[in-house]
Image (cartoon, grey):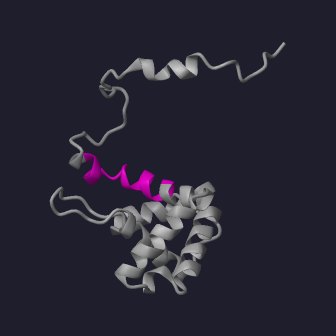
Amino acid sequence: MQNEITLSAEETRDLRCVAGVMIPANAEFDVPGADDAAIFADIVASLGRDFADVRLALGRLAALGGSPFADLDETRRQAVAASFQAEAGAPLAALSRSVLQCYYRDDRVIHSLGMEPRPPFPKGHVLEQGDWSLLDPVRTRPKMWRDVP
């Protein structure tokens, strides 16, 4: 989904840099970083409801660093990213969600995970059985809703 409001050139550069810091390329597993051209284009095009919070996140990173995030050296970027991560909040969640959802839908990444890049249906995907007892606290929790007449 394309946004009517777009990121500035500086915000776009910072977002691409942040994406690369979050998920760098890995030659051992032959996967691109989240700053790869195709993945990054998907990130920008998919911001949707997260646009405002991503913009806030980029502004906060620039404020913490004292300059645009992409202008910082590698050591300073890591320190600023760690400080921002410690703050948590909606902007961090939106930024993380925006990068991760696009990264993990890239065919190259799916291949590296040993999966076939395709929709889950009609073939489906096998889900290994887990420990269903982990849901016991949820099952024993009191009702959190009211019945509709």
Residue 69 located within the stretch drawn in magenta: no
Residue 102 located within the stretch drawn in magenta: yes
Image quadrant of residue 129? Answer: top left
Image quadrant of residue 92? Answer: bottom right
Q: Residue at x 31, y 64 (%)?
A: 33
**Left or right of 144 on screen, residue 106:** left
- Residue 62: % across, % down: 55, 80
Q: Note whether 42 is above or below 66 in the view shown.
A: above
| Quadrant of the snapshot with the N terminus | bottom right
Q: Residue at x 28, y 47 (%)?
A: 110
Query: Could you tell me if residue 33 is visible in this image?
Result: yes
Magenta residues span 97-110
Q: Note whether 68 is above or below 49 in the view shown.
A: below
Q: Note whether 49 is above or below 124 in the view shown.
A: below
- Residue 29: % across, % down: 18, 56
**Left or right of 131 on screen, residue 137:** right
Q: Residue at x 24, y 39 (%)?
A: 115
Residue furthest right in the image = 149
Query: Could you tell me if residue 1 is visible in this image?
Result: no
Q: Note whether 35 is above or below 89 in the view shown.
A: below
| Quadrant of the snapshot with the C terminus | top right
Q: Nearer the viewer, residue 139 or 92?
A: 139
State whether the magenta stretch is mostly helix, strand or loop: helix
